[in-house]
Amino acid sequence: MEFPSPLVPATLIRRYKRFLADCRLPDGREITAHCANPGSMMGLCDPGMKVWLEPNDDPKKKLDYGWRLVEHADGHFTGVDTSVPNRALKAALQAHEVPGLPAYDTLRAEVKYGEKSRVDFLLEGMGLTYVEVKSVTLSRQPGLAEFPDSVTARGTKHLGELANMVREGHAAVMLYLVQRTDCDRFDLARDIDPAYGAAFDEARAAGVGVVVLGTHISPDGITVADPLVSLA
């Protein structure tokens, strides 16, 4: 998935109200960018960090920039836009390039299921496979990516919905897309959200599959990479 507009570098001044970030452009101008991430962004929103913004000229959008990446001191990147995984995965799913999934012929996105929920992808073949996608950006230990970075009642609900689909005779997969280039392992942050950890264990026991994928990230775009080792 390529970014529609070339990204521009900036320095983060502060992130606030969850969805806003003040940044300083190379020419010294201070602007406010949209932050498409409802999580805590632990370790990713410290003042002074180098970030990459996507400019837009859409008159329907209130802000002229969207925050897309954090560039770390070692040259690695983290993608902070939680809408990116579904866009990147859709192309990979259409090309049948995502490992660990049952065979399928067609896919649909944002299909209603469960109790007032929408599954990210519904794969249709010999049967139905319900696929929920989560963006992973937290890393508190070198090389280890974790989810979630804050309490997520919505994420816990999704695990329950997937388990129910398995009980009804369908297949279901929880897919974690790690939007970091500095991690090769994945685990749950059970200390941050014990309820999510318990729901994950219940979903696994019910037969929900788990797939963890890495990403290739640069200011040009984000693409799906190979599976990572899951410790969960």
Image: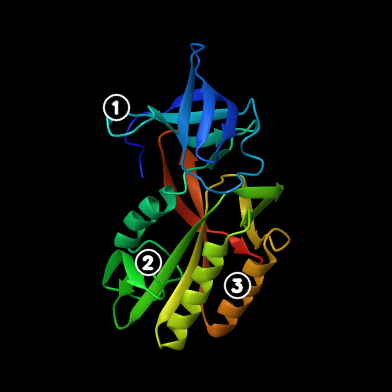
Percent across and percent down for residue 78 are 55, 41
Amino acid type at circle 1 is Asp
Q: How many numbered dots are placed on residues in this image?
A: 3
| Tag in front: 2 or 3 | 2
Above or below, 165 against 1 in this view is below
Structural crowding at the residue carrying mark 1, measured as other residues with C-alpha within 10 Å and reported as few (<14), some (14–19) or many (≥20): few
Percent across and percent down for residue 177 are 50, 56
Nearer-N-terminus badge (1/3): 1
Location of the N terminus by quadrant is: top left
**Residue indicated by mark 3:** 200
Structural distance between the alpha carbons of marks 1 and 2: 30 Å
**Quadrant housing residue 219:** top left
**Relative to 101, 104 lies left or right:** left
Q: Which mark is residue 118?
A: 2
Callout 3: SS = helix
The residue at the point 48 percent across, 41 percent down is 217
Amino acid type at circle 3 is Phe
Amino acid type at circle 2 is Arg
**Residue indicated by mark 1:** 57
